[in-house]
Image (cartoon, rainbow, N blue to C red):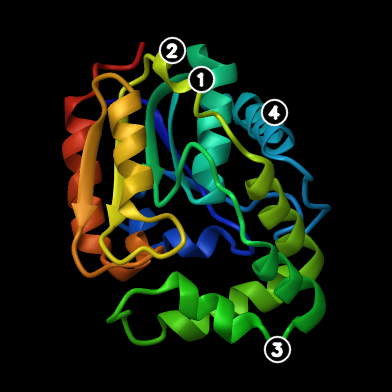
Amino acid sequence: MSARLVWVHGSGLTEKTFAGQVSAFPESDAVSLPGHPHGIACESVAEYAAWLDRYVRWRRAEPIVVVGHSLGGAIALRWALDFPQRVAGLVLIATGAKLRVAPSYLEMIEKRWPDCIPDMVGSLLGPSPPAGLREDLEAQHALVGRISTLRDYRACDAFDVMHELTGLAIPTLVVVGTDDRMTPPKYARYLHEQIAGSQLAVIEDAGHMVMAEKPDQVNAALSSFLARLPEAR
């Protein structure tokens, strides 16, 4: 499979969240979205998807397999729906077709930053995260900052492609952790049911940061998915 892998991170994070994947797939490209921390964060998933399209064309990397986590999964979905000719495959990790955010969560970011960061990171993790992951995620949030993080979560809150998925004809892998409290497994099952021919990988004892919590299991699912893709032309 000769298409390039591009990784797109989630809200308030950076490309470092995919460290366990980039090392396993060395020909891949983990991007940091605008404002994470450099530049200005976008205000909607559609704006981020347009940025991703410009980036892919600039790198002359198409067709690609785009791997998106959480907000990154929403961006990947929006981009694949808008530019299907550029996509060789789609991997949706800990995300959904609709990503409503509780008003109390948005208020926490607005009014309690940066004291809220430990609570935010705690909500992302499953029961047994690897040593050092919590501290790394807290550092990423602090680096990205309140304004970009708040824009990310507001973009998620407005995102909804539930009625567009049945027209998606791209090889897709959906990945979720059993202990994901942000985008529970029912979100992944909905994606799997609505996207024809998609594959579903459920990772035990992992939370929202499933690819960082259980990199070996996620990488194995990715490798199996990539091996089944038709050769990119």
Q: Are marks 2 and 3 in contact (CB under 8 Å)?
A: no
Measured as percent of width and height from the top left, residue 211 is found at: 34, 60
Whichever of labels 3 and 4 marks the residue nearer the N terminus, that label is 4
Q: Label 4's element?
A: helix
Query: Image check: 214 left or right of 117?
Result: left
Tell which tag, 2 or 4, sits nearer the viewer: 2
Query: Image check: 104 left or right of 164?
Result: right
- Label 4 Cα neighbours within 10 Å, binned few <14 / some 14-19 / many ≥20: few
Specify the quadrant that holds the N terminus.
top left
Q: Label 1's element?
A: loop
Residue position marked by numbered label 1 in the rendering: 164
Residue position marked by numbered label 3 in the rendering: 115
Instruction: Tell me the distance, in whole angstroms, between the alpha carbons under discs 3 and 4.
Output: 35 Å
Q: Amino acid at mark 4?
A: Arg
Q: Amino acid at mark 3?
A: Asp
Instruction: Tell me the distance, in whole angstroms, between the alpha carbons under discs 1 and 4.
Output: 23 Å
Which residue, as the protein is rendered here, is positioned at the far front?
A: 103
Q: Amino acid at mark 2?
A: Gly
Q: Residue at x 29, y 19 (%)?
A: 196
- Label 2 Cα neighbours within 10 Å, binned few <14 / some 14-19 / many ≥20: few
Residue position marked by numbered label 4 in the rendering: 54
Q: Label 3's element?
A: loop
Q: Which mark is residue 167?
A: 2
Q: Amino acid at mark 1?
A: Glu
Whichever of labels 1 and 4 marks the residue nearer the N terminus, that label is 4
